[in-house]
Image (cartoon, rainbow, N blue to C red):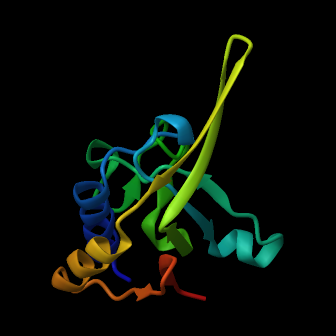
């Protein structure tokens, strides 16, 4: 994937699925991802909402946004977008829980139209480069 393809991928995700947040309860989107460095160390995956349009630079995702730290597109080894994600939050003494759906069929169609190679199953859309 080139930087242009990655940026297009994230733009399509933001336009198709909505606004991302680092808190699942406040996010319209959710994903998990890892980098080539982490694949070679401990296979750590981060989870968060997808980056928003204003967080996308030509070659990286901005620092301090939805993903919390900068990530160069060329570092991303694997990203998975599930068809649904669960959330929970606590307001005072009250716990709230829920589940949100992501229209991965619509996302896959938009990615195909944008000529972004990806894999879609019944439960995920992913790009896996390792």
Image check: 130 left or right of 52?
Answer: right
Q: Residue furthest right?
A: 42
**Up/down of 74 relative to 69, above or below:** below
Which image quarter holds the C terminus? bottom right
Which image quarter holds the N terminus? bottom left
Residue 54 in picture, x, y percent from top left? 27, 42
Frontmost residue, 34 versus 80: 80
Image check: 65 left or right of 4?
Answer: right
Residue 90 in picture, x, y percent from top left? 68, 23
Residue at the (56%, 56%) spot, across then down: 85
**Up/down of 94 relative to 114, above or below:** above
Question: How many numbered circles does the render carry?
Answer: 0
Frontmost residue, 68 versus 105: 105
Residue at the (35%, 66%) spot, across then down: 103
Q: Residue furthest top?
A: 92
Residue 53 in picture, x, y percent from top left? 26, 48
Snapshot quadrant of residue 41: bottom right
Snapshot quadrant of residue 36: bottom right
Residue 49 in picture, x, y percent from top left? 48, 49
Residue at the (69%, 71%) spot, across then down: 37
Residue at the (45%, 41%) spot, across then down: 27
């Amino acid at each position: 994937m080139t930087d242009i393809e990655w940026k297009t991928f994230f733009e399509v995700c933001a336009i198709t699925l909505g606004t991302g947040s680092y808190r699942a309860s406040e996010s319209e989107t959710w994903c998990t991802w890892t980098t080539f460095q982490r694949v070679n160390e401990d296979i750590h995956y981060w989870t968060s909402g997808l980056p928003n349009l204003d967080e996308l630079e030509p070659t990286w995702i901005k620092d301090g946004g939805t993903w919390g730290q900068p990530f160069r597109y060329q570092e991303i080894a694997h990203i998975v977008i599930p068809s649904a994600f669960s959330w929970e939050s606590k307001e005072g003494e009250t716990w709230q829980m829920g589940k949100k759906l992501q229209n991965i069929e619509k996302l896959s169609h938009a990615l195909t139209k944008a000529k972004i190679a990806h894999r879609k199953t019944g439960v995920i859309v992913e790009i896996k480069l390792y």
